[in-house]
Image: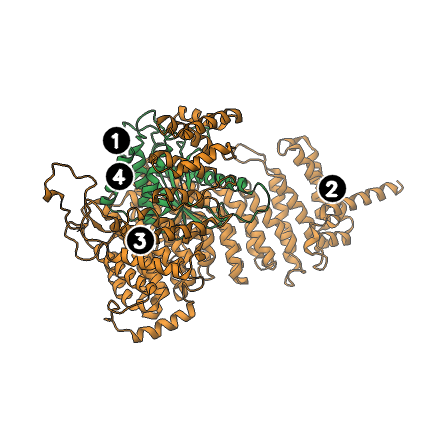
């Protein structure tokens, strides 16, 4: 394991000086030149590898050294360890302009493979990828089909095709397709000979037996990756590799543009083809061109895998492989059907049966996702009852398996990647958001960014309010899921819940029949259309707030809220915006009591409230009564300071006839009174240990808004002036030094003075504080010459100077 | 296909650890296409970029692993295993997957599958839309092979100067980044071949 000794070794490797490195290189050069391939060289090369790889900066090696490393790769009789190290060193140096490796046909395929790994690491600056591809193809062609070690070369082909899809000529691709058909379909069904048969073993013992299935029975059909034995022949190896690269080959080996049919053409073709193809037509006897033959063989291979996966494997490793094979088979069938719709009919019957089998097996749940994707892509043409598939997928799976991190990730990826395929089922997806949120609540670190990308698709005007509530209650959901796992009757081998936290009172509450309704609401699988106040649960679940998982979820919520709001404002109409604003204000004081949660959420809510007001300024007038109520109820001001500031600012900005003709003087007066009372309360309260001091920003915002309102309803001006001068004296008194910091007190004082001077000239005040819309262009606050604070200061100075000029 | 495989350090959560996350070994299978760079030091910058990409992945895996360990409430993993003969229950080791968006840090969007074993993290950087079940299985297999053949559980050993063995394992079990469908017997066969070529 990584110890202090290793740390110092790494440090040494990084800090080695150029001089020392030069000496080391020349030593290695001497060893390699002398073709000394013993343990000394091995040791030195290992150190050289560490030196090169330990640092991200380039290390200059001597040219002779580099050349010798390259030459060693080509040596005929060299231990594998050394050649592998040379290749690794050259690869770690890449991309590099000082390499001059050449593809040499005389080398054996293991060496060629090492050379290829170095060349492919150069980044295709000089068309290395296609050179390697051509080299491999020539090597594949030149050898006998049963030649040794072709299996080192085939993976290179796969890599080349993925890195650079158009690199093969049509005839080359065809040729390789033919070979792939041979390897996939006609691999031997006898086990291979042992590597070394001993002198004493009897002839019968040396006879290889037949290949078996994973459950021990003798193989019933052609060889696949799920066939086992004790030793394997070369062509069986190639079978494994051919299948491993099959999907990539099918996708990328075609000439550009001939891979997948266009969606519109496809559905038409699928429909017409289905009516022509009969269920029993088999193309085995017909002579097909190589690419079509490969597809046919691929289809048969997948069918066989699906059948083989039904067997009960004797070993755990094989059982895991069966599931991976199922996933791959479905993926390959999907590609085949997209390339050639005639496979659709046969695939569907096979996959429908598979779906029925896999549905009830919780261990195979991850196979359901590619199956669902298949039905999504092709279901229309074949009239599959995909609704039932999705119901099961979105309703049952998240409820039961939310705790599995890999499934959660794949599920959310499935939703994200296939949005355009959902079509009519998008509604099902949207209504299932409570279930999807379970994945998010339990596995928030890896899934937060996924959900930020997914939310725009999930957000819908009909469920927006319910979703906002759900997002705000997400940490609560995490806690409840934990409790659900604790109280479930069938525990797994290892507890899935947080074992470091004991919460007996919470468990009791979870089982209490009085709260069942609320817990069931929180755990609901679908959007219910109604909202429940979960306030009673907050106190009950408070002990769970120290649970790490709950805290992680709480940290993710602000980001999700931002994403939600940017999505919902795209689809919200005026009424919904009002409701969202009310929800914001209403929920701001009822949040799950996780440490620091409320503060972070408030800061998001306050900026989002302003965003809503900017989007729809008239909401201030429309919701005047509710806003008044909010301002009157704020006795825990300190805890919602940011939100209150936003509301106050919005009132000052948008409560005017310019933004909504329905604004009345009465409303302005009422707000004035409410804000006056609030200012009074805020400034009179002594700070204590429980209530931190009120931020000066709140005070200045209140004063500015009061002035703005006064400038619109000019009867209020005397009251406002009185208030402002009181504020000014207050800040200068010694009693307030305990309430505000010096800068804070100064800021309040300055602002009060500026506002007072403004109010002395009512019409100017109106212009400055309530500019008409023509004046109020977006540059208003950014343009230095017209910024409000600057305007205030200028006016103040003008007035003071005038006052100074007046006699007396 | 696999774009890269890396092994890095995992520091225990909840401890005051001022060290950095170190990449102990990394192997990139074929490079991302380098943008056309007429400047003379383009190759060096590409290499620098590649190294930084790998380090970024390692750091992210480390924080994901740490968060998962904290969330499950397990005590911080013993950095040293109890005994060198202990069969490490890899099926229960912390593991997960996450996606990397395009340009951040790789040009193409990629998926990372990771596994944490004591103080080492193993990760595969995959192309998007790979068979994750197969990737997970392969990663577990690689971890098991590395632990066995490099005797990583024995005190005092490390893998820094054993790159040749790591390369030997990778060329057989993950050749050029190709995920292989290997059933148990094939794995045993390959292991025998490996032991023959690399006597312990």
Q: Nearer the viewer, residue A228 or A571?
A: A228
Mark 1 and mark 3: span between their CA atoms?
Answer: 36 Å
- Residue at image position (78%, 48%) is A760
| Residue A585 location (% of width, % of height) | 52, 51
Q: Which residue is mark 1?
A: B86
Secondary structure type for disc 1:
loop
Mark 4 and mark 3: span between their CA atoms?
Answer: 21 Å
Neighbor class of circle 2 (other Cα within 10 Å; few <14, some 14-19, many 20+) is many
Give the chain coloured green.
B
Tell me the mark number nearer the camera, choosing from 1 and 3. 3
Secondary structure type for disc 3:
helix
| Residue A523 in view of the camera | no
To which quarter of the image does residue A548 belong? top left
Give the chain coloured orange.
A
Q: Nearer the viewer, residue A800 or A306?
A: A306
Q: Which mark is residue A753?
A: 2
Image height of A102 relative to A170, above or below = above
Check chain identity for marks 1 and 3: say if they share one: no
Q: Which residue is mark 4?
A: B193
Mark 2 and mark 4: span between their CA atoms?
Answer: 87 Å
Q: Which residue is mark 3?
A: A242
* Chain letter for the residue marked with disc 1 in the picture: B
| Residue A7 location (% of width, % of height) | 43, 26
């Amino acid at each position: 394991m990584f110890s202090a000794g290793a740390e110092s070794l790494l440090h040494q490797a990084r800090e080695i000086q150029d001089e020392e490195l030069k000496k080391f290189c020349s030593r290695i050069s001497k060893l390699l030149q002398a073709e000394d391939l013993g343990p000394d060289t091995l040791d030195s090369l290992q150190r050289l590898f560490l030196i090169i790889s330990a640092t991200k900066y380039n290390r200059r090696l001597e040219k002779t050294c580099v050349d010798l490393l390259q030459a060693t790769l080509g040596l005929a009789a060299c231990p594998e360890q050394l050649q592998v190290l040379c290749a690794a060193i050259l690869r770690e140096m890449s991309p590099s302009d000082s390499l001059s490796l050449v593809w040499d046909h005389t080398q054996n395929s293991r060496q060629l493979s090492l050379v290829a790994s170095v060349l492919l690491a150069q980044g295709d600056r000089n068309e290395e990828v296609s050179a390697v591809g051509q080299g491999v193809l020539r090597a594949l062609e030149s050898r006998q089909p049963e030649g040794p070690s072709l299996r080192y070369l085939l993976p290179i082909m796969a890599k080349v095709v993925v890195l650079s899809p158009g690199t093969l000529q049509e005839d080359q691709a065809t040729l390789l397709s033919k070979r792939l058909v041979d390897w996939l379909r006609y691999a031997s069904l006898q086990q291979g000979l042992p590597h070394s048969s001993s002198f004493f073993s009897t002839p019968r013992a040396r006879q290889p037996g037949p290949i078996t299935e994973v459950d021990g029975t003798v193989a019933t059909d052609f060889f696949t990756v799920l066939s086992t034995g004790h030793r394997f022949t070369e062509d069986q190896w190639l079978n494994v590799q051919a299948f491993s690269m099959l999907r990539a080959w099918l996708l990328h080996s075609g000439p550009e543009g001939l891979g997948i049919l266009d969606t519109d053409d496809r559905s038409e073709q699928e429909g017409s083809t289905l009516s022509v193809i009969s269920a029993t037509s088999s193309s085995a006897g017909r002579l097909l061109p190589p690419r079509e033959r490969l597809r046919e063989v691929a289809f048969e291979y997948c069918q066989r895998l699906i059948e083989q996966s039904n067997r009960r494997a004797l070993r755990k490793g094989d059982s895991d492989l069966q599931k991976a094979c199922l996933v791959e088979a479905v993926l390959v069938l999907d590609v085949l059907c997209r390339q050639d719709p005639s496979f659709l009919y046969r695939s569907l019957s096979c996959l429908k049966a598979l779906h029925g089998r896999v549905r009830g097996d919780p261990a195979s749940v991850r196979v359901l996702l590619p199956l669902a994707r298949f039905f999504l892509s092709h279901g229309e043409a074949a009239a599959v009852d995909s609704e039932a598939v999705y119901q099961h997928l979105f309703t049952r799976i998240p409820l039961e398996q939310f705790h599995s991190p890999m499934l959660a990730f794949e599920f959310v990826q499935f939703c994200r990647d296939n949005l355009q395929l959902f079509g009519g089922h998008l509604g099902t997806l949207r209504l299932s958001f409570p279930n999807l949120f379970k994945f998010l609540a339990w596995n928030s670190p890896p899934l937060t960014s996924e959900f930020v990308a997914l939310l725009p698709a999930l957000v819908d005007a009909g469920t927006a309010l319910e979703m906002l509530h759900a997002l705000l209650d997400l940490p609560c959901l995490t806690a409840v899921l934990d409790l659900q796992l604790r109280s479930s009757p069938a525990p797994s081998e290892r507890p899935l819940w947080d074992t470091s936290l004991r919460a007996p009172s919470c468990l009791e509450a979870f089982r209490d029949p009085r709260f069942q309704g609320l817990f069931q609401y929180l755990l609901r699988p679908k959007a219910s259309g109604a909202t429940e106040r979960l306030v009673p649960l907050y106190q009950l679940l408070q002990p769970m707030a120290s649970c790490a998982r709950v805290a992680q979820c709480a940290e993710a919520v602000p980001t999700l809220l931002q994403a939600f709001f940017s999505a919902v404002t795209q689809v919200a109409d005026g009424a919904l915006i009002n409701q969202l604003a009310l929800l914001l204000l209403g929920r701001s004081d009822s949040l799950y009591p996780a440490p620091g949660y409320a503060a972070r959420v408030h800061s998001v809510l306050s900026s989002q409230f302003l965003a809503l007001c900017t989007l729809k300024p008239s909401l201030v007038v429309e919701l005047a009564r509710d806003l008044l109520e909010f301002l009157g109820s704020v006795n825990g001001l300190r805890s919602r300071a940011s939100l209150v500031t936003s509301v106050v600012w919005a009132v000052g900005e948008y409560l005017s006839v310019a933004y909504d003709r329905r604004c009345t003087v009465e409303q302005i007066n009422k707000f004035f009174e409410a804000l006056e009372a609030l200012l009074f309360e805020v400034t009179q309260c002594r700070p204590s240990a429980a209530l931190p001091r009120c931020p000066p920003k709140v005070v200045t915002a209140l004063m500015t808004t009061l002035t703005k309102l006064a400038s619109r309803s000019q009867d209020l001006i005397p009251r406002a002036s009185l208030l402002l001068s009181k504020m000014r004296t207050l800040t200068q008194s010694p009693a307030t030094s305990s309430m505000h910091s010096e800068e804070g007190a100064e800021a309040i004082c300055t602002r009060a003075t500026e506002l007072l001077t403004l109010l002395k000239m009512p019409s100017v005040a109106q212009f400055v504080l309530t500019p008409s819309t023509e004046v109020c262009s977006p540059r208003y606050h950014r343009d230095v010459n017209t910024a409000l604070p600057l305007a205030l200061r200028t006016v103040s100075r003008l007035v003071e100077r005038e006052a100074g000029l007046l006699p007396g | 296909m696999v774009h890269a495989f890396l092994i890095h350090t995992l520091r225990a959560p909840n401890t005051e650890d001022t060290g950095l996350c170190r990449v102990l070994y990394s192997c990139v299978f074929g490079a991302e296409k380098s943008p056309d760079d007429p400047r003379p030091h383009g190759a060096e910058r590409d290499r620098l970029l590649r190294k930084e990409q790998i380090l970024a992945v390692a750091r992210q895996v480390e924080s994901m692993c740490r968060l998962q360990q904290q969330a499950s409430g397990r005590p911080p993993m013993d950095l040293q295993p109890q005994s060198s003969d202990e069969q490490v229950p890899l099926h229960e080791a912390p593991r997960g997957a996450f996606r990397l968006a395009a340009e951040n840090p790789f040009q193409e969007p990629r998926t990372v599958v990771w596994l944490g074993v004591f103080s080492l993290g193993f990760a595969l950087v995959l192309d998007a839309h790979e068979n994750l079940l197969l990737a997970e299985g392969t990663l577990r297999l690689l971890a098991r092979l590395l632990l066995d053949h490099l005797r990583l559980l024995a005190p005092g050993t490390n893998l820094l100067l054993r790159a040749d063995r790591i390369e030997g394992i990778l060329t057989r079990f993950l050749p050029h980044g190709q995920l292989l469908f290997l059933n148990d017997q094939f794995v045993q066969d390959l292991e025998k071949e490996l032991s023959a070529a690399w006597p312990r």
